[in-house]
Image (cartoon, helix red, strand yellow):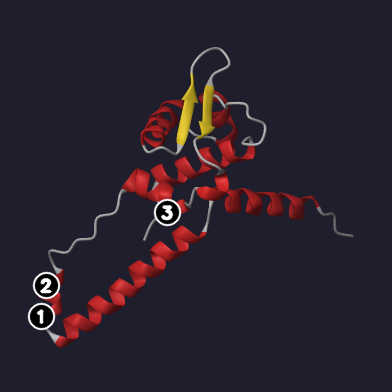
Amino acid sequence: MELSCKTEYALLALLELTAYYNGGEPRQIRQIAAQQNIPDRYLEQLLATLRRGGLVRSQRGAKGGYFLAREPWKVTVLDVVACLEGFEIDRSQEKAISQTLDGGVVREVWQDACDAYLSVLQKYTLQDLCDRRHAKQQFNLMYYI
């Protein structure tokens, strides 16, 4: 399993929107891009995909920008990954592998791995990521003598 650049940038952008969620002010692409070091053009495409997926909403005008479409504690990392990457389990090989006893065992283990992957991504929300970031920032502010 690998975290794609697309998903990583999207999560960073959503983390930025989560940090400003309570303020009610939209974040502009250039603000998010500068804060998270994401190329503007690429971020624009990602936010369009996230908007179509119902994870963000946009506001036009001089004071426009992007907001989270739902509360950050209701948006899971799985929601983001599913929006950007989709989930397609290749079942074409399943019948061929499962025809033998050994193949069935391999398939069961692979299914357990997939279930664990989905479970972990479903467990964490954007709010959890924001809370972790805050905790790490607080830890970094500590001074040691």
Mark 2, residue position:
95
- Name the side, left or right, on which 20 lies relative to 111: right
Q: Secondary structure at mark 2?
A: helix
Q: Residue at x 10, y 80 (%)?
A: 99
Q: Residues within 10 Å of mark 3 (few under 14, many from 20)?
A: some
In the rendered picture of this protein, how many numbered marks are placed on residues? 3
Residue designated by label 3: 78
> Is residue 39 at all visible to an observer of this figure?
no
- The span from disc 1 to disc 3 (Cα, nearest Å) is 31 Å
Please name whichever residue, 71 or 130, is drawn nearer the observer in this view of the structure.
71
Callouts 1 and 2 close, C-beta under 8 Å:
yes
Residue 109: image location, x then y, percent: 30, 78
Instruction: Report the residue that reaches farthest toward the bottom.
Output: 101
Q: Is residue 59 left or right of residue 138?
A: left
Q: Give how far across and how far down residue 33 sits, in percent.
A: 53, 30
Q: Is residue 31 left or right of residue 69?
A: right
Q: CA distance from mark 2 to mark 3?
A: 27 Å
The residue at the point 39 percent across, 49 percent down is: 81
In the rendered view of the protein, which quadrant contains the C terminus?
A: bottom right
Q: Quadrant of residue 15?
A: top right
- Residue 113: quarter of image: bottom left
Mark 1 secondary-structure assignment: loop
Query: Dot 1 corresponds to which residue?
Result: 99
- Whether residue 81 is situated above or below residue 93 in the rendered picture: above
Is residue 27 positioned above or below 76 on the image?
above
Q: Position of residue 4 (x, y in %)?
A: 38, 49
- Callout 3 amino acid: Leu
- What amino acid is labelled 2 in the image? Lys
Q: Which mark is residue 122?
A: none
**Which element is circle 3 on?**
helix
Gap between marks 1 and 2, in whole Å?
Answer: 6 Å
